[in-house]
Image (cartoon, grey):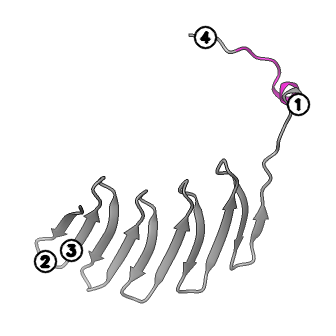
Amino acid sequence: MYYFSGMKNIQGKEESLKLFNDKGGLIYEFYKGFFGQHAEYTYDDNGNCLTFKESSGYWAERTYNDQGNKLTYKNSKDEWSERTYDDQGNELTYKNSNGVSRTYETPEYTMEELTEMIGNFKIKKQ
């Protein structure tokens, strides 16, 4: 089941429409401004914006993994980006259409190395 919400200003020149899923999450939004321009947005069940389209012809699309981390982005100006993540959600790689490329490493430490870095500590029960 879906729920709608709409608004129109007193002059009748600005409108918006929102569509929500049964959990109250926004899944679609339409906005029309004073000068006739309009934009449409779609969202996934987690509230992440999937698509954006303007009446000017500009558009953008995004994809996400199950944890809600952004995987890909592309738009009508041929700009794009891609990311990868490890199982804990830490970003491992990033690259984009401007030639930027980064690789992140999540360091792994032994208990001995951690103790040397942060010292000994005790956790108190409360």
- Callout in the foreground (2, 3): 3
CB under 8 Å between discs 2 and 3:
no
Q: Is residue 7 left or right of residue 93?
A: left
Q: Which residue is mark 4?
A: 125
Mark 4 and mark 3 lie on one chain; the one further toward the N terminus is: 3
What label sits on residue 54 in the rendered view?
none
Mark 2 and mark 4 lie on one chain; the one further toward the N terminus is: 2
Q: Residues within 10 Å of mark 4 (few under 14, many from 20)?
A: few
Report how far apart the C-alphas of labels 2 and 1 lie in the structure. Answer: 66 Å
Q: Residues within 10 Å of mark 3 (few under 14, many from 20)?
A: some
Q: Which residue is mark 3?
A: 15
- Callout in the foreground (2, 4): 4
Tell me the amino acid under the disc marked 3. Answer: Glu
Q: Is residue 30 left or right of residue 72?
A: left
* On screen, residue 11 above or below 43: below
Give the SS element for disc 1.
helix
Report how far apart the C-alphas of labels 2 and 4 lie in the structure. Answer: 62 Å
CB under 8 Å between discs 2 and 1:
no
Give the SS element for disc 3.
strand
What label sits on residue 12 in the rendered view?
2
Which region shows up in magenta?
113-122
Q: Determine which quarter of the picture holds residue 65.
A: bottom right
